[in-house]
Image: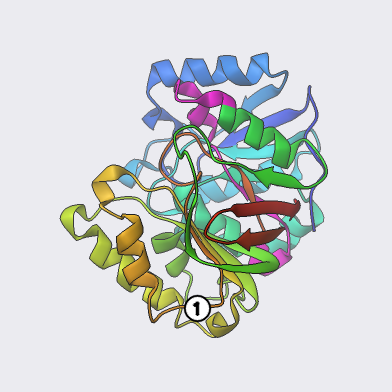
């Protein structure tokens, strides 16, 4: 199930399912508002988005209320998160998935929002979008690439060929191969929170898009390695069709050589694996559909990633 594409003049609702809106630096907030208005959209904010509670979030009830209200409001065509954080998974057992399925809309965000994306896809089949937060465009960091990639996925129709940004330069081939399949993924450690719950999507025959942020300091590579191993032990993982890893902050220490070592003995050699695509906790970033489909062709000389259905 894919929601209607966004059009100029549409209302975009900003919600805070993780950290609240007050956590957005005020200058970035104003710049982001200017950006969305200049793009021709009507920006509104959920009523509880500035409520301050424990862990820099509003209460569970307030966050759930804002999500339900945004999906129910016929004027709202897209829902976008203000920030990530750590506790979106608190909301999953309180959401009305029938309500969401009856009111399909674009939902966009990344990082901790991975829990919401994958839960909604698992429970309703609605395609959601791993992409910029509202606040992303409050920072002057190669915004043109991020903006164009966002528009390609949520405004335009037709296949989208993903090309490296100037920051990425090129995408790295870890393993060669060709595949086409449905995309699952986002932030790896957040996705793993869903294991063993009703909110974990079936990963059989899927293409994994995975990234992570450095919250472990010098131990990041160890933590990433075991988190990936955990995901690849989930039922159905033996049938995955491909893996695309995002870009990682330099502090992670996750080099091409390191990811090659991590992949070795975990993933069959015929499955295409790419490292360094433009998504993750770095700028700029693509937008990709969780539940949409992608076609990948990878060899040592060329990486071709085409988002087919979004």
Measured along the vertical axis of the image, is residue 27 above or below residue 210?
above
Residues in magenta? 120-144
Q: Secondary structure at mark 1?
A: loop
Let me know if residue 39 is in the magenta part: no
User: Where's residue 156, x and y in %?
Assistant: 79, 37
Let me know if residue 122 is in the magenta part: yes
User: Where's residue 162, x and y in %?
Assistant: 63, 45
Q: Nearer the viewer, residue 109 or 230?
A: 230
Q: Nearer the viewer, residue 64 or 224?
A: 224
Check disc 1: other Cα within 10 Å, few if <14, some if 14-19, many if 20+.
some
Query: Can residue 60 be seen in this snapshot?
Result: no
Q: Quadrant of residue 207?
A: bottom right
User: Where's residue 125, x and y in %?
Assistant: 73, 64
Give the residue displayed 37% in from the left and 52% down from the top: 86
Give the residue displayed 80% in from the left and 39% down from the top: 5
Give the residue displayed 70% in from the left and 33% down from the top: 151
């Amino acid at each position: 199930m894919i929601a209607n594409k966004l059009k100029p003049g549409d209302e975009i609702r900003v919600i805070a399912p993780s950290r609240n809106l007050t956590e957005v630096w005020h200058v970035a907030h104003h710049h982001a508002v200017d950006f969305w208005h200049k793009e021709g959209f009507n920006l509104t904010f959920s009523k509880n988005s500035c409520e301050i509670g424990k862990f820099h979030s509003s209460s569970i009830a307030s966050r759930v209320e804002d999500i339900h209200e945004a999906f129910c409001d016929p004027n709202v065509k897209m829902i976008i998160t203000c920030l990530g954080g750590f506790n979106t998974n608190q909301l999953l057992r309180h959401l009305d998935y029938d309500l969401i399925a009856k009111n399909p809309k674009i939902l966009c965000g990344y990082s901790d929002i991975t829990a919401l994306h994958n839960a909604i896809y698992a429970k309703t089949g609605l395609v959601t979008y791993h992409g910029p937060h509202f606040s992303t465009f409050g920072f002057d960091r190669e915004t043109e690439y991020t903006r164009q990639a966002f528009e390609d996925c949520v405004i335009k129709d037709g296949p989208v060929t993903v090309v490296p940004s100037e920051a990425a330069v090129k995408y790295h081939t870890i393993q060669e191969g060709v595949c086409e399949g449905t995309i699952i993924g986002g932030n790896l450690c957040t996705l793993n929170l869903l294991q063993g719950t009703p909110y974990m999507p079936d990963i059989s025959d899927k293409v994994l898009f995975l990234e992570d942020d450095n919250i472990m300091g010098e131990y990041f590579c160890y933590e990433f390695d075991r988190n990936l191993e955990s995901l690849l032990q989930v039922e159905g993982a033996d049938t995955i069709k491909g893996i695309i890893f995002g870009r990682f902050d330099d502090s992670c220490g996750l080099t091409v050589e390191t990811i090659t070592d991590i992949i070795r003995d975990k993933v069959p050699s015929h499955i295409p694996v790419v490292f360094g695509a433009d998504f993750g906790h770095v700028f700029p970033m693509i937008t990709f559909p969780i539940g949409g489909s992608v076609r990948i062709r990878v060899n040592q000389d060329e990486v071709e990633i085409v988002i087919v259905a979004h």
